[in-house]
Every structure is written in C-alpha cells, then in structure tokens.
Image (cartoon, rainbow, N blue to C red):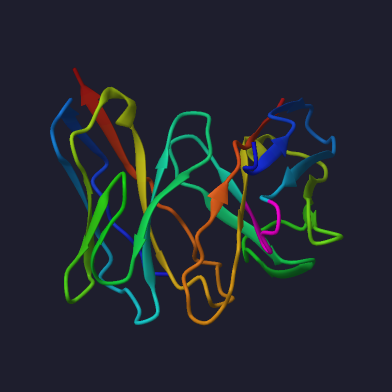
C-alpha cells in the first residue's frame, strides 16, 4: 500500500500526559498537512510542511502542539500536557506541490483517534 | 479561504443520480473547488477538483457555473457504498495562508436500497 499511513491508529491517554503521532506520507510528496477532526465536524487545519520547512500553523493552535518533519519525509505531531478537549481524530495528508498556480490535491491517511481521559 | 455552505444531509436510492450543491459566494479568482468523500473512521478521500465549467472523472462530475459562486457534485447511479459525508473545499492551495482552511460540516448522504 503506497498511501498515507499513520500510527498509532488509536491512542488513549490520561490528562496531562504527552502523546506523539507519526505520519508517513506518500513517497515523494513534498507537502504534508496535519488536521484535527471532532465528531460531526469537518477537518480543521493545524499545520503544514513543504519538505522539511514548517510553512504555516493555525492561528488557533495551542503552544502545547508541535510538529516536525526532520528530513522532509515522515512527520510527528506531539501534544504536551493533554487535555480532554484534545480528544479528536488527528489526520495527516500529503500532496505533491509543483507550483505554477496549480491546485494542490491532498491525500489523507486513516487518522489517529486520540481519547484523553 | 472562501466559506462554503452545503446541505446538512441528503437521502437517495440506489441507482439514482445525486447532486450535491455547495455555495461559495466569496470565492476568489485563484481558488479551486475540491470535493472529498469521508467514511466513518477514515480520512477524507479526494473525489474531484475543478476551476470552472465542467470536470468529469471515473466517479463523479463537477459542474461550476460561470460566476463560480456555487458548484455541484454529481454522482451517477449511486450505490449503498456511496453512503458517506461529502465535503466541498474552496481555496487557493498555492498560497501560504491556510489558516482559514475548514471543510465545514459536509453533507451526509444516505443511499437507501
């Protein structure tokens, strides 16, 4: 399977603990996005990378959230001091951005469902 | 990113054509329109993307009028497996400002036998 993969698929943690999720994008995709999705809502943008550079973060993103993409391949999303409100599905997407005014088509992974007790 | 409005839910029967319309009155010149499908506990799946007029692929058609203030996703002859949430997303992904990127609540399509 050459699609976007995410690990773990499910994570249950206690409030105050740190958690880290991993995303492996489609090979050779240069853009990688993180989204959060709560029940009944569409995905909400968190941040994105072009290669290893983090180009943008949501203005609403708490400083407890941090993401890395050290070699321009896989990415990790860490949430420190988790809160119950962090419970959600965390989605990763990747795309091959060529520039030149063309649209960016994102391919999503299956997500990591986080439950904070 | 242009705000989008879609019906919350739609019902259809197997074999029928389904049209889901999305309103995006504030669409910008450089914005594209993309539709995604999402099944429970899965990530969204790309369906189709367009800028103007009509786009067709093996699974759907996308109709965009001249003013581009709305778009219609057309699913021919739906089956039970097309039951899902459909999201309309409008934006210029070439720019760096993705802070307003929100999929909205989507349209929950239920296909009945």
Closer to the camera in the image, A65 or B12: B12
- Residue B25: which quarter of the image? bottom left
Q: Position of residue A35 (x, y in %)?
A: 60, 50
Magenta span includes A28: yes
Q: Is residue A13 above or below residue A29?
A: above
Which quadrant is home to the N terminus of chain A?
Answer: top right
Residue A38 visible here? yes
Question: Residue A80 at what x, y percent from top left?
Answer: 82, 45
Residue B66, percent from left and from top: 17, 75
Residue A17 image-quadrant placement: top right
Query: Residue drawn 77% across and 42% down?
Result: A22
Quadrant of the image containing the C terminus of chain A: top right
Q: Nearer the viewer, residue B106 or B35?
A: B35
**Total number of numbered discs in the rendering:** 0
Q: Nearer the viewer, residue B3 or B74?
A: B74
At 18% from the left and 76% from the top, the residue drawn is B67
Mark yes or no: residue B83 visible: no
Q: Residue furthest top?
A: B113
Does residue A11 belong to the magenta stretch? no
Q: Which residue occupies 22% across, 70% down?
A: B69
Which is more toward the observer, A44 or A103? A103
User: Is residue B56 depicted above or below A104 in this figure?
Assistant: above
Q: Residue at x 69, y 50 (%)?
A: A25
Question: From which residue to which does the magenta span run?
Answer: A27-34
Name the spot of residue B61 as percent of width and height, x first. Answer: 24, 53
């Amino acid at each position: 399977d050459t699609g976007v993969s995410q690990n773990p698929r499910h994570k249950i943690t206690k409030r105050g603990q740190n958690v880290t999720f991993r995303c492996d994008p489609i090979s050779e995709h240069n853009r990688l996005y993180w989204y959060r999705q709560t029940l009944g809502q569409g995905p909400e943008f968190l941040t994105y990378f072009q290669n290893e550079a983090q180009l943008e973060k949501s203005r609403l993103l708490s400083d407890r959230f941090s993401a890395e993409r050290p070699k321009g391949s896989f990415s990790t999303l860490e949430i420190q001091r988790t809160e119950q409100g962090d419970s959600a599905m965390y989605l990763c997407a990747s795309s091959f951005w060529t520039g030149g005014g063309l649209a960016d088509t994102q391919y999503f992974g299956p997500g990591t469902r986080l439950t904070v007790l | 990113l242009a705000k989008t409005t879609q019906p919350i839910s739609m019902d259809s029967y197997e074999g029928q054509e389904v049209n889901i319309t999305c309103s995006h009155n504030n669409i910008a010149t450089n914005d594209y329109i993309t539709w995604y499908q999402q099944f429970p506990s899965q990530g969204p799946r790309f369906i189709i993307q367009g800028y103007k007029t009509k786009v067709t692929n093996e699974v759907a058609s996308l109709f965009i009028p001249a003013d581009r203030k709305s778009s219609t996703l057309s699913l021919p002859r739906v089956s039970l497996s097309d039951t899902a949430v459909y999201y309309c997303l409008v934006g210029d992904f070439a720019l760096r400002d993705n802070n307003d990127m929100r999929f909205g609540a989507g349209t929950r399509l239920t296909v009945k036998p």
